[in-house]
Image: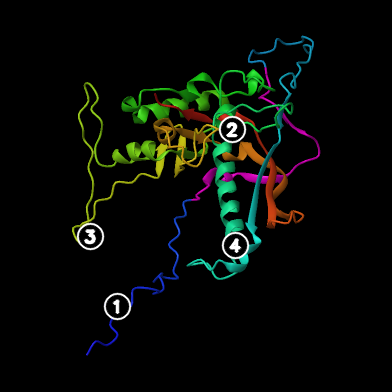
Amino acid sequence: MPGLTQSNTSTGARESLSDTLFEYNAQETPLYSMLKKTTGGGNPVEQWPADTEGVSTGRGKKDNTPTPATTNQSDNYGLLEALYHWWEDAVSVGKKAEALVNRAGVSKRKLFARELTKVFAAQKTRIDRNLGDDTDQREEGSEGSETRGIGSWISSNAQGTRPVPEKFRPPAGAIQNPAFADIREETFEDILEALHYETGTTPRYTGLFGMALKRLVSSWSAYAPDKASHSVVRQFNSDRKTRALTKVIDLLEYSEGTIEIHTSRNLGWSRDFTKNTAMSTASKRRGYILTLEDFELKTAQKQQYTPLPPDGGGKRGQIDALMSLCGTPKRSGKIVPS
């Protein structure tokens, strides 16, 4: 009997589509998240004071001699400046799309909410990449003003726009540019030593590393690089029950200071990157050694959504933020391998 079977019902059959949406979400924004946020926006140019240590004579004074002339303890007092960056994106959904489209994984009439959520996350990632790049700040002109990336702040050379005064820049030894294969523990010790001699402190630094640099450092837990005239003597304890290989280093402790390591995929990017721009090798190998309390994100406006007037095509809106990265970089360093 030729009854109804699956094989002869293909014409007109509805598409089988799960209502569970797999969402790839890689929106980690470590620098943006760790920076101290303070209220700003009183002026298009943020300014803050900085100073260096005072001076004192080291010679003994002869009896019955007059007090010498006073010294100016504030002759190194100075101002640093930063400009604001306005990030803006737009989102819209057509009337027919919102009324008629029932997309799998997105409940009906929620298309706009989903578009809005995605652009908020994408803009936050864009902000984190701008904060972690090497771009100098830009004055308002034919194009909008831009804030300075932390890679440009941490420089022993003068920047092009509103440069950091020389006395507040990190020492040259705190900026390392070795070949990637030549990076050793001594590379980080040299950075910390340069910062120690310059500032007299041995703080707990925040290390922000690309994944390739983090992997290189973590590999030191499994082997010691050869060094001429030295023997490898490292020993490791292993729990036989777990049978797990552990090759992770999250903390570097030296006499000159401690580096607590965090990873980021948002370091050293070009500001002209697009959605399809591949991550560069240089970005994966980048590393910042930050005295994090010396930096802050001045916020005139946090990310916010503003509905735009209807234009007859459907619902639309604006997502924007207005912030400036401010910092006194004298106590921070970086490693930019070739």
Residue 35 drawn at (x, y percent): 60, 44
Earlier in the chain: of badge 4 and badge 2, it is 4
Instruction: Indicate the secondary structure of the residue bearing disc 2.
Output: loop
Residue found at x 24% / y 25%? 227
- Left or right: 112 in relation to 213: right
Q: What residue sits right under mark 4 in the picture?
A: 97
Q: Nearer the viewer, residue 46 or 63?
A: 46
Mark identifier at residue 8: 1
Above or below, 118 against 17 in this view is: above
Q: What residue sits right under mark 2 in the picture?
A: 149
Residue found at x 45% / y 34%? 287
Residue 75 drawn at (x, y percent): 74, 18
At label 4, the amino acid type is Ala
At label 3, the amino acid type is Thr
Cα–Cα span, label 4 and label 2: 39 Å
Residue range (magenta): 27-56
Above or below, 33 against 112 in this view is: above
For the question of whether residue 113 can be seen, the reply is no
Cα–Cα span, label 1 and label 3: 56 Å
Cα–Cα span, label 3 and label 2: 44 Å
Earlier in the chain: of badge 3 and badge 2, it is 2
Cα–Cα span, label 1 and label 4: 33 Å
Residue 119 drawn at (x, y percent): 59, 52
Answer few, some or many: residues within 10 Å of disc 2's Cα (few below 14, many 20 plus, some between 14 and 19): many
